[in-house]
Image (cartoon, helix red, strand yellow):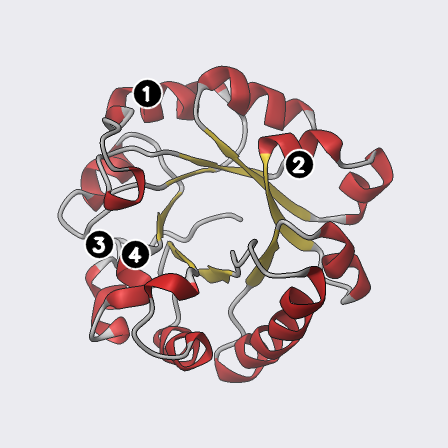
Amino acid sequence: MTSDLLCLTNRALCQEPLFDRLEKLASAKPAGLLLREKDLSEAAYRALAERVLALCAATAGIPCLLHHFPAVARQLGVKALHLSLPRLKALSAADRAFFSTLGASCHSLAEAKEAEALGCTYLIFGHVFETDCKKGLPGRGLAALADICAHVHLPVLAIGGITPENAPAVRAAGASGLCVMSSAMTSPDPAALVKAFLPEKGRCANV
C-alpha cells in the first residue's frame, strides 16, 4: 500500500531534535514531508532545508515540500513549494511558473478558487475537525471539505484533527490526501502512525 499522508513539521512540538524526528518519519515513508518552520530566518531555513532534502532523497526518496520561502526553494532548485494564500498572491508570475508543485492553505471555497486561478497544483484545506492547534475554533467540517473537492479541479488535502479513525470519512468526502502535524511531531512510534493511516486500497496523494 502507498501512503497518502503528508507530514508537516513544527519543531516546537518535538520532544527531540527536529532532524531526529524527521529521520524516523522519512523511514516510515509517508507520501511526503512539508518543512513548515516559517518562523526561522531565511538563512536558518535554508540550512535546515538542505539537510532535510538530503535526508528525504537518501532515506526513502520521498518528496520534500518547502514552505514560506520561495527564494530559498529557487536557490536550492526545489520545485515543490507550499505557501499561505497571502504569500501566494504576492508571488510573481515568474516565480509561480518555476514551481511544478505549488500549494496553498485555504479555508473557504472562495480561497480555494482563488488559489486555483493563481496556478496551484494542489490545496490544503482546513481545519476540518477541532484541533489543539486551533483551540476554541470549531472545525469547518466534512461538508465544507466535500464542497471544495467538488468545485475545484485540483487535489485537495485535508488538515486539522485528522486521525486514523476519521480518515476514511475524510477520503470519502473527496480528499486526495491527509495532512498531520501534531501527531507527526509527537507520536512515540512514527512508523506505526504512518501505517495506521494507510488507505485500504493504497491511494496516493497527488501533490
Q: Disc 2 on helix, strand or loop?
A: helix
Mark 1 highlights which residue?
A: 144
Please identify the quarter of the rendering in which residue 13 is found: bottom left
Quadrant including the N terminus: bottom left
Q: Residue drawn 63% across and 30% down?
A: 86
Instruction: Give neighbour class at mark 1: few <14, some 14-19, many 20+ (Cα, 10 Å).
Output: some
Q: Disc 4 on helix, strand or loop?
A: helix
Looking at the image, tell me whether mark 1 or mark 2 is earlier in sequence order.
Answer: 2
Q: Are marks 4 and 3 in contact (CB under 8 Å)?
A: no
Please identify the quarter of the rendering in which residue 150 is found: top left
Identify which amino acid the numbered label 4 is placed on: Ser
Mark 2 highlights which residue?
A: 87
Instruction: Give neighbour class at mark 2: few <14, some 14-19, many 20+ (Cα, 10 Å).
Output: few
Looking at the image, tell me whether mark 3 or mark 2 is earlier in sequence order.
Answer: 2
Q: Residue drawn 35% across and 42% down?
A: 159
Q: Residue drawn 17% across and 42% down?
A: 166
Mark seen at residue 200: 3
Q: Are marks 3 and 2 in contact (CB under 8 Å)?
A: no
Mark 4 highlights which residue?
A: 182
Looking at the image, tell me whether mark 4 or mark 3 is earlier in sequence order.
Answer: 4
How far apart marks 2 and 4 lie (CA) works out to: 23 Å
Identify which amino acid the numbered label 1 is placed on: Ala
Q: Nearer the viewer, mark 1 or mark 4?
A: 4
How far apart marks 1 and 2 lie (CA) works out to: 23 Å
Farthest residue toward the left?
165
Mark seen at residue 26: none
Q: Closer to the camera, 205 or 38?
A: 38
Looking at the image, tell me whether mark 1 or mark 4 is earlier in sequence order.
Answer: 1
Let me know if residue 119 appears in the view.
no
How far apart marks 3 and 2 lie (CA) works out to: 36 Å
Residue 138 versus residue 38 in the image, above or below? above
